[in-house]
Each structure stands twice: as C-alpha cells, then as structure tokens.
Amino acid sequence: MASTICGWCGRLAHMSPVGGAEVISDQNSRLNVGFEAYRCANCRRLVLAYGWTDYKRTNDWDDAPSDLWSHPQAQQPRWLPPAKSNRTFPDVPAAIESLAVEAHDCLTIKADRAAVALARAVVEAAAKEKGVTRGSLIAKIDELHQLGLLRGHIKEAAHEVRFGGNEVAHGDLTPIEHEAAEEILTLMDEVLNELFQSPARVTRARQRRLERSQAGPDSVSPAAPER
C-alpha cells in the first residue's frame, strides 16, 4: 500500500497491512466492498481502508488477500479516521481560518472541487474582513490592491483563486486535477499571508524591538552602527 496521510497523527506515512482483509459481496455492483486494517508507521495506530475491489471470494471462509487495492479494477480506498491537513493560520480571524482549514482538509481527501470552492470563499471573506464589502469579487480584489493591502502578484494570485472557484461553482461539473487544486490552495495561502499573517509578524517583531529598547541598555547587546 502506498503512503497516505494518517487520520490520527496527520503525517504522511507508510501504511502496513495488519492481519487479513474482508470482502463483502455487493449484488448490485460488479465490484465488491473491501475492508482492510493498516498500521501507521509514524504513530503506530490502526486505520481502516475501505472501498471497491474486483477481488471475489471463492469460499465464504477464505481469507481475502492483503492489499485488496492492487487488483486491476480496484479503486483507491478511503480511510477511517479520515485524513486531515493539520493546517493552522494563527494570525487569521477565526471564522476565516476555519474556512481555510476546511479547504485544506478537503484537499487532503482529494475532494478537489470542494477545496477550490472553499478557497474562493476564503478570499471573499478576507476582503470583507478588511472592510472591502461592495461589488463583485473581481472588484473586491482590485480594491484591496488599490488600498495597498495586496501587492500586484498577490492580487493576481487572488484572481486565480477566483477563476478556479468560478469553474467549479457554476454547475458545469468542470473536472479539476488534484495538482491544480493544490496550486489554487497555495495561492489562497499567499493571500492570507499577505493580508493577515505577514503584517502580524511585522507587528510582533516591532513590539519586541520596542520592548528591548524600553528595558534599558543592560538587557540588550550593544547595537551595531547604522548603515
């Protein structure tokens, strides 16, 4: 079995089969439902893989082979507990962070269109949080740039997230490759960094510098000459 993200520890880890597997016949499908236990190489906890497989028992008492998912028509299994991204955005307002984390969780289980749709919602919610509430999302992104809150290339990143969200939200059932969804969420992260996280880091660095200055010369090393 290939590596996957563990639903317990959130790490990408190798999964080793534990014991036998179980296959239940489905009379309404050409495939059967398989279940198989695995152990995470990182946290050593057990996870359950389940999904469709073309393996068929010859006798009810036969043990199914390990790794049901290597058969020609088998589909990639799902996992319990489901994988999560363990992403955090500590300087982003809680409601927007929740949306962004949910988008990454969707990406982790390859719910790619859901991830991209949420990414678009994140960009719009971020604009509103910054007081840009009027007009379409196009207008909101452009106004963030005009206000100096988004640099030029980050403005374009926000528009790419918007384009991706539009593709999956208009009911045309447009397919999207997983790699494209990953790229769109990376751009969403860039927007959140620009609007919230980077300014917060600068503020903290400035505050620490001022605190060192106010503490007096005995608490800091000699300052280097100005350049």
Image: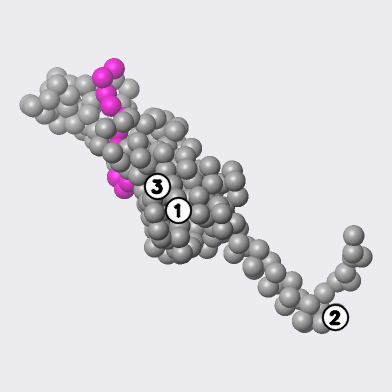
Q: Mark 3: few, some, or many residues within 10 Å (few <14, many ≥20)?
A: many
In the image, which is nearer the foreground, mark 2 or mark 3?
3
Circles 1 and 3, Cβ within 8 Å, touching? The answer is no
Say which residue label 1 marks.
140
* Disc sitting over residue 218 in the figure: 2
Identify the residue at image location x=40%, y=58%. Answer: 134
- The outermost residue toward the right is 225
Q: Toward the viewer: 33 or 154?
A: 154
- Residue 118 position in % (x across, y down): 36, 48
- Residue 44 position in % (x across, y down): 42, 46
The correct choice, above or below, for 226 with respect to 172 in the image is: below
In the image, which is nearer the foreground, mark 2 or mark 1?
1
Q: Mark 2: few, some, or many residues within 10 Å (few <14, many ≥20)?
A: few
Q: Is residue 50 left or right of residue 203?
A: left
Identify the residue at image location x=45%, y=60%. Answer: 132
For the residue marked with disc 1, what is the amino acid? Lys
- Within the image, what quadrant is residue 224 found in? bottom right
Q: Which residues are magenta?
A: 72-85
Say which residue label 3 marks.
120
